[in-house]
Image (cartoon, rainbow, N blue to C red):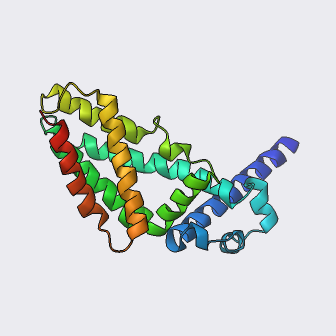
Amino acid sequence: MQEEKRNDRTIKALKTKNKIYEEATKLIRKHGFENVSVDSIVEAAGVSKGAFYVHFDSKDALAVDMINEYTAEVDMDYKSFVESFDANTAASEILNSLIGKIADILNDTIGYDNMKALYKAQITKAIKTDAVIGYARDLYKIFDYVISKGVEQGEFRRDIPVDIITKHCLLAIRGLTYEWCIRYPDFDLKEQALKHFEILLTGIRK
């Protein structure tokens, strides 16, 4: 009987945590991280503020969980996208298409407000964002795969190490996104990203 009660409490607690997480995700995607409070989250989830703090130390702690999960989701999407290309497709074509895909996700799905909040968190180190900036991230491995493919196909230069080119691709994406954030709405992220990577490709093509 006691075991059943413990199981019931565990299930109830998990449901409460998931409800808080789901409602927070909806609110943050709609209004932006900085415009959503703990009060608005618990109101939407239909739970007490005490219940929120049972599962999350703070809104920032909840944000870390959301960043980790969402990063894994989008990277899986990028991986599936790259794997959808025919084996004989030129690496430069895959790379350009991937850049367009990333720009679309940043602009249309994640959004300016959330990217601005993420950059602020990264600069101030208010929350851990290792899942986004770490080189263990799957997106790094995806770029590494595409660049390696280009080298193997004889399309890209061999005198520059693959890992160096890969890191510069990520630096370029990060820099372009930052430029988008500080010049929004007068900066077309996708257009500028594609132009920038065409210049980058000029430098690494054989």
170 left or right of 118 in image = left
Residue 103 in the image, given as x and y percentages of width and height: 32, 58
Quadrant of the image for the C terminus? top left
22 left or right of 132 in image = right
137 left or right of 187 in image = right
- Is 15 situated above or below 129? below
The residue located at (33%, 40%) in the rendering is 168
Residue 148 in the image, given as x and y percentages of width and height: 25, 29
The residue located at (61%, 55%) in the rendering is 124
Residue 188 in the image, given as x and y percentages of width and height: 29, 67
Quadrant of the image for the N terminus? top right
Q: Quadrant of residue 205?
A: top left
Q: Is residue 142 something one can see in this rendering?
A: no
Residue closer to the observer: 186 or 59: 186
148 left or right of 173 in image = left
Residue closer to the observer: 32 or 12: 32
The residue located at (37%, 44%) in the rendering is 170
Q: How many marks?
A: 0
Q: Is residue 11 something one can see in this rendering?
A: yes
Q: Quadrant of residue 123?
A: bottom right
The residue located at (72%, 73%) in the rendering is 39
Residue closer to the observer: 165 or 150: 165
Residue closer to the observer: 175 or 146: 175
- Is 158 situated above or below 180? above
Give the residue furthest to the right. Answer: 2
